[in-house]
């Protein structure tokens, strides 16, 4: 006999699995391709950080996007329902 609490736990696990699958798809279709595109640009701009101060802020922004896969990995593992934004 299944209790209401068991039913809620099962639904919660199903929801977490669905969100994990969504984040995996997003990781493969958006996050990794974005990282592959931005990483060479970021590497080139790193050299200009010392003598072009505006480049520093741009590099920080790009670095947040490049580390987004880590955030996505935690969201996938935990099955988070909130969007794993790179800008936190």
Image (cartoon, helix red, strand yellow):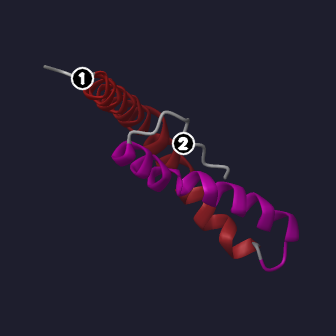
Relative side of 64 to 57, left or right: left
From this viewpoint, which residue is outermost toward the bottom? 50
> In which quadrant of the rendered view does residue 11 lie?
top left
In the rendered image of this protein, does residue 39 appear above or below residue 34?
Answer: below
Q: Which of 52 and 1 is in front in this view?
A: 1
| Rendered residue at 26%/27% (across/down) | 10
SS at badge 1: loop
Q: Does the magenta stretch include residue 14?
A: no
Graded by Cα atoms within 10 Å as few (under 14), some (14 to 19) or many (20 or more), the crowding at tag 1 reads few
Query: Earlier along the polypeptide chain: callout 1 or callout 2?
Result: 1
Magenta segment: 50-78
Q: Distance between the residues labelled 1 and 2?
A: 33 Å
Binning the other alpha carbons within 10 Å of mark 2 as few (below 14), some (14 to 19) or many (20 upward) gives some
- Counting from the top left corner in percent of width and height, residue 7 is at 27, 22
* Near-viewer residue (72 or 77): 77
Residue that badge 1 annotates: 3
Is 53 situated left or right of 48 in this image? right
Q: Going 59% across and 51% down the picture, which residue do you hit?
A: 65
Q: In which quarter of the image is the N terminus?
A: top left
7 relative to 61, above or below: above
Q: Nearer the viewer, residue 80 or 55?
A: 80
Label 2 SS: loop
Residue at x-position 79% and y-position 62%: 57
Q: In this view, does 54 lie above or below 17?
A: below
Give the residue pinned by disc 2.
84
- In front of the other: 12 or 51: 12
Question: Which x, y percent locates residue 13?
Answer: 30, 32
Residue 69 counted in the magenta span = yes
- In the displayed structure, 9 sits above or below 4; it is below
- Residue 6, position in %: x, y? 25, 28
């Amino acid at each position: 006999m299944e209790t209401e609490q068991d039913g809620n736990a099962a639904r919660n696990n199903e929801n977490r699995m669905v969100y994990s699958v969504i984040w995996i798809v997003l990781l493969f279709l958006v996050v990794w391709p974005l990282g592959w595109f931005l990483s060479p640009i970021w590497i080139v701009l790193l050299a200009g950080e010392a003598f072009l101060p505006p480049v520093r802020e741009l590099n920080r922004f790009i670095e947040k996007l490049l580390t987004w896969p880590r955030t996505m990995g935690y969201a996938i593992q935990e099955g988070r329902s909130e969007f794993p934004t790179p800008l936190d």
